[in-house]
Image: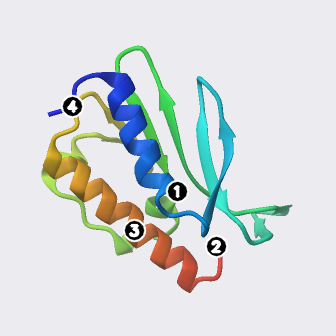
């Protein structure tokens, strides 16, 4: 079980980076890690150089994972009760502890998001 917030942050970023070159790092600072697609696309009324996919943001008491595919394709995801506890709002997970089971479920969830966005030609 990972409880060190820096270790959780590094783990989540690694899971997201594993999907390169379909996803590229757009922002990588101390406060924000953001990853997006590589294909220019319309996001709302704006044309962007890559469709937003996810962010990892460390906070004092947890690490936040903002995962956009669960917002855009809500009916495609079913979360375990344990992972659902971390979900605050529609697409933000507040993670204080990362068990091997939750880590594996997050990997699967992110992989599914990549496949859905690939199918919809967003990445």
In screen coordinates, is 103 left or right of 61?
A: left
Measure the alpha-carbon separation of dots 2 and 3. Answer: 13 Å
Measure the alpha-carbon separation of dots 2 and 1. Answer: 13 Å
Q: Earlier in the sequence, mark 1 or mark 4?
A: 4
**In this rendering, does residue 104 appear at all?**
yes
**Mark drawn on residue 123:** 2
Residue 15 in the image: state x and y as whole percent: 40, 52
Q: Nearer the viewer, mark 3 or mark 1?
A: 3
- Residue visible at 46% across and 77% down? 115
Measure the alpha-carbon separation of dots 4 and 2. Answer: 31 Å
The residue that label 3 is drawn on is 111
The residue that label 4 is drawn on is 2
- Residue visible at 17% across and 57% down? 80
Q: Earlier in the sequence, mark 2 or mark 3?
A: 3
The residue that label 1 is drawn on is 68
The crowd level at tag 4 (other Cα within 10 Å; few <14, some 14-19, many 20+) is: some
Residue 77 in the image: state x and y as whole percent: 32, 68
- Residue visible at 28% across and 22% down? 4
Q: Earlier in the sequence, mark 3 or mark 1?
A: 1
Furthest-bottom residue in view?
A: 119
Query: Which image quadrant for residue 79?
Result: bottom left
Q: Secondary structure at mark 2?
A: loop
The crowd level at tag 1 (other Cα within 10 Å; few <14, some 14-19, many 20+) is: some
Measure the alpha-carbon separation of dots 3 and 1. Answer: 13 Å
Q: Secondary structure at mark 1?
A: loop
């Amino acid at each position: 079980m990972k409880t060190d917030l820096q270790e959780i942050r590094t783990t989540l970023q690694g899971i997201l980076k594993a999907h390169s070159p379909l996803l590229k790092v757009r922002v990588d600072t101390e406060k924000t890690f953001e990853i997006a697609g590589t294909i220019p696309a319309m996001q709302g009324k704006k044309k962007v150089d890559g469709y937003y996919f996810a962010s990892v943001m460390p906070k004092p008491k947890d690490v936040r994972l903002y995962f956009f595919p669960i917002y855009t394709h809500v009916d495609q995801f079913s979360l375990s009760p344990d992972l659902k506890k971390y979900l605050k709002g529609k697409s933000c997970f507040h993670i204080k502890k990362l068990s091997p089971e939750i880590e594996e479920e997050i990997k699967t969830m992110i992989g599914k998001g990549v496949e859905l966005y690939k199918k919809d030609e967003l990445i």
